[in-house]
Amino acid sequence: MKAFLFVFFCIFFSVPLAVYAHGLSLFSKEKTLYASYSDHTPASGAKVVLVDANGVIILQDKMDEKGIWKLPENLETIPHLIIVDDSGGHRAMITWEEFLKERPKGLLDILSIRVVIGVMFIIGGGYAIQRFLLKKKT
């Protein structure tokens, strides 16, 4: 039992623990872009940059106080990327196709998958240690 606990704690402390940091998430609906953090506060004042396929900046604008940005009517060039950047170092990008499809894009989409995989890895590792290491000693 001591060997199992020793190995378990070695694995537990060698796996980096997840730190909860708020990320910037983007969501589009009806040619309107919504930007918010993981705690659902709006990304007010964040900079919005539209870039074409060559990396040339088409338009620079800012989110309003509710974290909402509306697409202007008079765009001459179709953008390739929409980049939202705030002063705190948070940055999120959405492609023009994703913007038109009205699908959410952000940190939480990937984070939930990572949590499930991490929990399965820890449970599976504990089971494997118990099954193979402790069985050999008896």
Image (cartoon, helix red, strand yellow):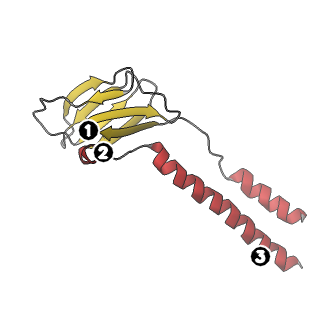
Note whether 80 is above or below 34 in the view shown: below
Task: Identify the element where label 2 is drawn.
Answer: loop
* Discs 2, 3 touching: Cβ within 8 Å: no
Residue 10 placement, left or right of 97: right
Q: In the drawing, does residue 68 fall left or right of residue 88?
A: left
Q: Could you say where residue 90 lies in the image, as x and y percent from the top left?
A: 44, 32
Q: Residue 119 sits in which quadrant? A: bottom right
Tag 2: amino acid = Glu
At 13% from the left and 32% from the top, the residue drawn is 75
The CA span between labels 2 and 1 is 7 Å
Task: Determine the secondary structure under disc 3.
Answer: helix
- Distance between the alpha carbons at the discs numbered 3 and 1: 56 Å
Residue where numbered disc 2 is placed: 102
- Nearer to the camera, 100 or 21: 100
Instruction: Bin the neighbour count of mark 3 within 10 Å (Cα to Cα): few under 14, some 14-19, many 20 and up.
Output: few
- Sequence order check: which comes first, mark 3 or mark 1? 1
Pointers 3 and 1 in contact (CB under 8 A)? Answer: no
Q: Earlier in the sequence, mark 2 or mark 3?
A: 2
Residue 106: which numbered mark, if any?
none
Question: Which residue is located at x 43 percent, y 32 percent?
Answer: 36
Marks 2/1 in contact by CB < 8 Å: the verdict is: yes
Residue depicted at 24% across the width and 37% down the height: 31
Horizontal side of 107 relative to 120 (left or right) equals: left
Location of mark 1 (residue):
30
Q: Of all residues shown, which one is farthest toward the front?
A: 30
Mark identifier at residue 132 = 3
